[in-house]
Image (cartoon, rainbow, N blue to C red):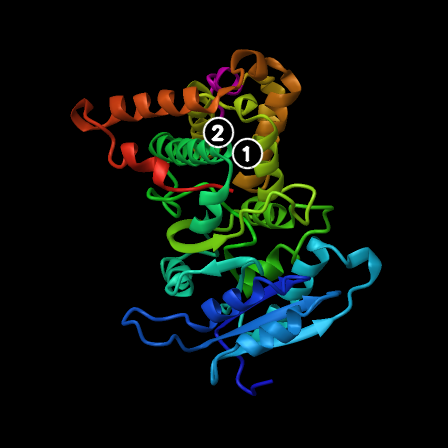
């Protein structure tokens, strides 16, 4: 290993990805700075575990001469030989490489994903603006997206547009100075970075059965750490419908394939109500109890008073959401609706809220992006 620790370490868990790993390695090795020159000051570790194919060998052969990419192989014990254990092993290796540099960056993506050439530069830029963690956009590989069945591709695009429109409306009603619009809705391991300080603060990768990336970001929010969802750092990922995890993109695509018309999501009224409820709770933590809170949350006043006593805003919001679910009123007032309807409703609200009543910027172009 090099003597001087790097400022940024990209750690990629990989298992039986021989067919795809070469593209990932070449993309990671080809990261560029603002002027288009090769980016310096980072390392990439391909952390291969429990593979029965040629993942490690093909990854090693794909490394361009002189680029800071290394391949390490190891065997996880049976209880850890899963996606969560593999992600933890990769991120722990990155943390060890950073040594005592608490401002150093741990970055991760997936072995079936291809980062854009300026991906790492845009993730790093978020930390220059004060972020403790950054989540980038995850798009489907264009060639694989084109091969999806038509109904699946249509729902996928509608869902992507819906979620971006929901974020735009939420950013207006409940602004976050550390995560302003433009932003997006994704916070997954295919495009995630955080400081070593933040990683230590939350205790590393959580011990959960699945969705370890979502749980990691939840841990960051519980500590009121600043998470920036930057739309500029992009990766393209596999569109396979047979995945390696119980929950994830592949299972979502498979669900849409089984019954695309059945997909239901929160409508525009619910998105707006949630944003206003969270904004009201934030204000109450600063100014004291408000009699309007129970109506905003459709939850018991005692539960909301208890939520306000939480040591962090993140924990207060988590408790308030638990309270509204316990009360059981929210679901009856805000039933889910078909995604196409929800998207139309959101676009209508965005147009109405735009200056002069004109179209909201970019509202008509939201179908060009994708979601996980």
Classify 114 as above or below 150. below
| Residue 75, placed above or below residue 146 | below
User: In the image, what residue occupies the spot 55% across and 40% down?
Assistant: 314
Q: Position of residue 266 (x, y in %)?
A: 50, 23
Q: Quadrant of the N terminus?
A: bottom right
> Residue 144: which numbered mark, if any?
none
Q: Is residue 147 above or below residue 59?
A: above
Residue 99 seen anywhere in this rendered image of the structure: no
Between 74 and 284, the one lying in front of the other is: 74
Q: Mark 1, residues whose alpha carbon is within 10 Å: few (<14), some, or many (≥20)?
A: many
Of the residues under marks 2 and 1, which one precedes in the sequence?
2
Q: x and y percent of residue 364 in the render?
A: 28, 32
Q: Is residue 365 left or right of residue 109?
A: left
Q: Is residue 141 left or right of residue 74?
A: left
Residue at image point 43% right, 28% down: 275
Quarter-of-image position of residue 13: bottom right
Q: Which residue is mark 1?
A: 317
Viewer-nearest residue: 99 or 8: 8
Whether 99 is among the magenta residues is no
Residue 357 location, x and y as percent?
Answer: 19, 22
Q: Residue at x 36, y 71 (%)?
A: 32
The residue beneath circle 2 is 281
Q: Is residue 295 magenta?
A: yes
Q: Depth check: 308 or 357 in front?
A: 357
Q: Residue furthest right?
A: 78
The Cα–Cα distance between marks 2 and 1, rounded to whole angstroms, is 8 Å
| 266 is higher (above) or lower (below) than 37 | above
Q: Which residues are magenta?
A: 288-297
Q: Are marks 2 and 1 in contact (CB under 8 Å)?
A: yes
Classify mark 1: helix, strand or loop: helix
């Amino acid at each position: 290993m090099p003597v001087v620790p790097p400022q940024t370490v990209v750690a990629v868990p990989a298992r039986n990805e021989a067919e795809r790993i070469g593209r990932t390695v070449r993309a990671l090795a080809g990261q560029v700075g603002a002027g288009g020159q090769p980016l310096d000051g980072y390392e990439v570790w391909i952390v291969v575990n429990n593979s029965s194919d040629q993942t490690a060998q093909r990854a090693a052969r794909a490394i361009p001469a002189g680029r800071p990419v290394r391949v390490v192989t190891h065997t996880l014990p049976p209880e850890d030989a899963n996606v969560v254990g593999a992600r933890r092993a990769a991120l722990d290796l990155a943390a060890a490489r950073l040594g005592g540099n608490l401002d150093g960056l741990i970055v991760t993506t997936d072995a079936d994903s291809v980062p854009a050439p300026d991906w790492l530069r845009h993730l790093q830029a978020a930390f220059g603006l004060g972020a403790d963690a950054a989540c980038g956009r995850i798009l489907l590989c264009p060639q694989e997206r084109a091969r999806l069945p038509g109904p699946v591709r249509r729902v996928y695009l509608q869902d992507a547009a819906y979620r971006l429109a929901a974020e735009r409306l939420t950013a207006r009603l409940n602004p976050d100075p550390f995560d302003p619009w433009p932003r997006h809705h994704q916070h997954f391991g295919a495009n995630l970075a955080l400081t070593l300080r933040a990683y230590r603060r939350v205790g590393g990768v959580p011990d959960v059965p699945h969705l370890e990336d979502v749980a990691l970001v939840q841990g960051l929010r519980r500590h009121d750490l600043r998470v920036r969802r930057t739309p500029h750092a992009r990766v393209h990922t596999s569109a396979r419908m047979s995945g390696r995890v119980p929950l994830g993109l592949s299972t979502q695509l498979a669900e849409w394939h089984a019954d695309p018309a059945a997909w239901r999501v929160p409508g525009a009224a619910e998105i707006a109500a949630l944003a206003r409820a969270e904004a009201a709770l934030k204000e109450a933590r600063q100014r004291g109890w408000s009699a309007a809170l129970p109506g905003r949350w459709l939850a018991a006043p005692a539960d909301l008073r208890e939520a306000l006593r939480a040591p962090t805003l993140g924990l207060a919001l988590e408790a308030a959401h638990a309270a509204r679910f316990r009360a059981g009123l929210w679901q009856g007032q805000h039933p889910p609706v078909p995604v196409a309807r929800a998207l139309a409703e959101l676009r209508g609200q965005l147009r109405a809220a735009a200056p002069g009543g004109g179209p909201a910027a970019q509202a008509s172009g939201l179908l060009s992006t994708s979601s996980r």
